[in-house]
Image: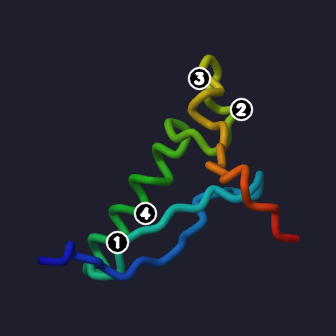
Amino acid sequence: MRPHQEETELVDLGTGSGKKEVKIGTGMTAPVREELMALLKNYQDIFAWSYQDMPGLSSDIVHHRFPLNLECSPVK
């Protein structure tokens, strides 16, 4: 059984001070979508939109590591 995959749309909750993008499902009715958008806009200050919004968070969580095979030369 495959997991349910609903189509999504990208919406910007920002108010001119930069993008605050989230993805929401497209399968809801218009009234439910309007309520969801109002809720997300009303509480957008509780989301972390950047690493700077998460003071005290360990940098170990955001470090990217690439498992490289040392016997292979890098590809440009």
Residue type pointed to by label 2? Gln
4 and 1 marks in contact (CB < 8 Å): yes
Q: Nearer the viewer, residue 69 or 67?
A: 69
To which residue does mark 4 refer?
A: 37
Asked whether the beta carbons under mark 3 and mark 4 sit within 8 Å of each other, the answer is no
Amino acid carrying label 4: it is Met
Q: Secondary structure at mark 4?
A: helix
**In the image as oriented, which residue stretches furthest toward the left?**
1
Nearer the observer: mark 2 or 1; the answer is 2
Residue at the (62%, 37%) spot, across then down: 62
The mark lying in front, picked from 3 and 4, is 3
Q: What is the C-alpha distance between the residues marked 1 and 3? A: 32 Å
- Find residue 46 and name its label: none
Q: Which residue is mark 3?
A: 57
- Residue 57, image x and y in percent? 59, 23
Disc number lying in front (1 or 3): 3
First in sequence: mark 1 vs mark 3: 1
What's the amino acid at mark 1?
A: Arg
Dividing the picture into quadrants, the one containing residue 5 is: bottom left
Establish if 18 lies above or below 75: above
Few, some or many C-alpha atoms within 10 Å of disc 4 (few <14, some 14-19, many ≥20)?
some
8 vs 62, nearest the viewer: 62
Q: Which mark is residue 52?
A: 2
Q: In which quarter of the view is residue 38 placed?
A: bottom left
Residue assigned mark 1: 33
Q: Residue at x 62, y 49 (%)?
A: 67
**Of callouts 2 and 1, the N-terminal one:** 1
